[in-house]
Image (cartoon, coloured by chain):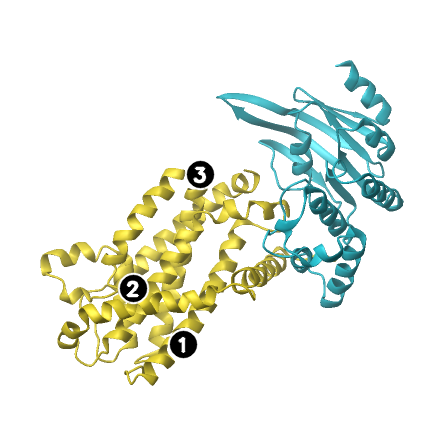
Amino acid sequence: MISLKNVTKYYRVNGSKNYILKNVTLDIPSNTNVGIIGKNGAGKSTLLRMIGGIDFPNSGKIESDKKFSWPMALSGGFQGSLSGKENAQFVCRFYGKSHDAIREALAEVEEFSELGKYFYMPIKTYSTGMKSRLGFAMSMAFDFDYYLIDETLSVGDKYFKEKCQKKIKQLQDNKNILLVNHGMAVLKNMCDSGILLNDGEMQYFENIDDAIKEYNRI
Amino acid sequence: MEQRTSFEIQKAVIMSLFLREMKTRFGSQQLGYLWAILEPAAIIVVFWVMFGFRMKKTMPGVDYPMFLMIGMLAWNLFSGYVTRSMNAFEANQGLFVYKQVKPVDTLISRLLVECLLYLIVVCVFIIAGYLLGFRVAIDNIPGLAAILFLFILFTFSTGLLFAVVGNFSENFKKVVGLIMRPMFFMSGIFFSVQDVPEKFRDLLLLNPCLNFLELIRTEYFAAFNSQHASLLYIVSCTLVISLLSLWLYSKLEKRIIAS
């Protein structure tokens, strides 16, 4: 379960406060895959980042005893002059994997990302799609309770998208995802429940279809 | 993944950042280490030619190139570190998607990289000096280690302070850039403060770097003893800047991560 207790988050825009969450208290139950829906600027990514512990509410608390992946977004997390392999190695190291576990994880990442020789080339030679493939493959090498995915399933070719979706489906036996995506078909396919963000309010729907219906209404 | 203490996590993060930085800076195609030797060597030669003859008289028993080398490397470590620190958080912003990586870790790991690099460079220069027939012996090794430790602490806290302020102010970066240039000539890299006319001495000694360089040389050279630099002054400077930078950083850490 993820508990939000009196959470307020805003950004200052030209002196006035633009609310993402306004005193929200809500529990997101466990064992459900949650799609996060909302208009541009409603704060979907910010919510994901707060849950992932790399952004912070202005007041209130977000609590959970689950392990979260880093929020997988389209940018960030890589050192351009190092290869994909070296970047993956770096993340494995500070997550505290042992020498053997790192070797195993690297083999896994190389295989799943299907980057071929690019795996050994600097990240700056990668396309956006290749970066998101690497990022996704890296997070799959770790044992998290929740995988936080921000739009990374929207880029890349159809084949790899399907491969990722299949992989997540496999994971879902004991793992869950929190997904930000603009494609309603992807959300319907991947998620059970939904969160709708609108004007500082946050609503939870047990069924993703209801969340989408409500989103289309506003 | 088993539960780790926050200290263990930070240690693992700093270690992996360290290895990553070593690879980027000194990887097979980088000439980073070569420049760290060639650049000070070139400047040492220039100042040696310009002032070497005069300094022989004012500092008997000290070989001027060695005197220059100590000043040059200490200054390069300090100025290089604090200048790069101003952009450190921005440059590493991408890493803060991993909640284990705290902004300060990137500064600590880079300090380790720089210290290791300069240790190697100093050894190269000492060997070169020995081969050229200069007096290279260190007068007081424990004393030198102590003052260098203080100097590294001073360098780190100044770097942290500059990193935090630089993250929020572009003007600050420009001002520091402007100040660093004249500081090169006022930090006693190629002179000792005893050679400076008395009326300027006290003003120059407000610069902590000048005090550090004088005291580092006092410990290194048996024949050099700074009459004017104050240990109390640099200990106080280090203490004040450490506390100020840590306080400011702890207040702003979350904003730096989320920015």
Tag in front: 2 or 1: 1
| Mark 3 residue type | Phe
Chain in cyan (letter): A
Q: In the rendered image, which residue does mark 1 sit on?
A: B124
What amino acid type should be assigned to the residue bearing mark 1? Answer: Val
From this viewpoint, is residue B154 visible?
Answer: no
Rendered residue at 52%/61% (across/down) = B25
Please determine whether, in this image, residue B10 is positioned above or below residue B65: above
Label 3 near label 1: C-beta < 8 Å?
Answer: no
Q: State the residue in front, B60 or A120.
A: A120
Residue placed under numbered mark 2 in the picture: B212
Chain letter belonging to callout 2:
B
Chain hosting mark 1: B
Q: CA distance from mark 2 to mark 1?
A: 22 Å
Residue under numbered circle 3: B168
Separation (CA) of disc 2 from disc 3: 29 Å
Residue B34, visible in the rendered structure: yes
Residue B188 in the image: state x and y as whole percent: 24, 63
Quarter of the C terminus of chain B within the rendering: top right
